[in-house]
Image (cartoon, rainbow, N blue to C red):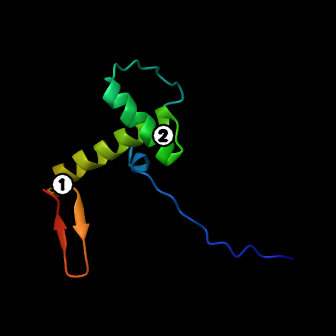
Amino acid sequence: MSRNHEPKLEITTATETLPPAPEKITRVSVDLTRTQVGVLEALMKRSGMSKAAVMRFGLGILADSCSDKDDGFIVGAWKENKERRYPVL
């Protein structure tokens, strides 16, 4: 009997905080600039996700940040070094 010693990775995404997707999918047409398409394609390459998955993930992150802001949190980017953590303005 062999054991798999690889650690189990638990991956969570921002979309987990959204309500479950309805069974019926609605197709949406979105007009993007060439720059936006370039960003989308770069994110696809970097993440290995499809266009739809990248957009769904982005919607989840935006939904989470709006919810956090409604709860009084400051949402933004932070840098960290050995001495401190500070917001990027």
Q: Is residue 50 above or below residue 64?
A: above
Instruction: Report which quarter residue 7 is drawn in.
Output: bottom right
Q: CA distance from mark 2 to mark 1?
A: 31 Å
Q: Nearer the viewer, mark 2 or mark 1?
A: 2
Residue 6: image x %, image y %? 67, 72
Q: Which residue shows up at 39% across the image and 50% down it?
A: 14
- What's the residue at 54%, 45% (across, down)? 48
Residue 46's spot in the image, x, y percent? Answer: 47, 47
Relative to 86, 17 lies left or right = right
- The vertical placement of 42 against 1, above or below, is above
Residue type pointed to by label 2: Met
Side of 69 where 50 appears, left or right:
right
Is 73 located above or below residue 47 in the figure?
below
Amino acid carrying mark 1 in the image: Asp
Q: Quick one: quadrant of the C terminus? A: bottom left
Query: Dot 1, crowdedness within 10 Å: few (<14), some or many (≥20)?
Result: few
Q: Are marks 2 and 1 in contact (CB under 8 Å)?
A: no
Question: Is any atom of residue 18 visible in this view?
Answer: yes
Q: Dividing the picture into quarters, in which one does residue 54 lie?
A: top left
Describe the element under mark 2 as helix, strand or loop.
helix
Q: Can residue 21 be seen at all in this image of the molecule?
A: no
Q: Dot 2 corresponds to which residue?
A: 44
- Circle 2 crowding by C-alpha within 10 Å: few under 14, some 14–19, many from 20: some
Please tell me which residue is depicted at 17% across the width and 49% down the height of the picture.
Answer: 70
Q: Earlier in the sequence, mark 2 or mark 1?
A: 2
- The label shown at residue 80 is none
Residue, far right: 1
Name the residue carrying label 1: 71
Give residue 11's position: percent from left, percent from top. Answer: 51, 58
Rendered-image quadrant of the N terminus: bottom right
Q: Dot 1 lies on which element? A: loop
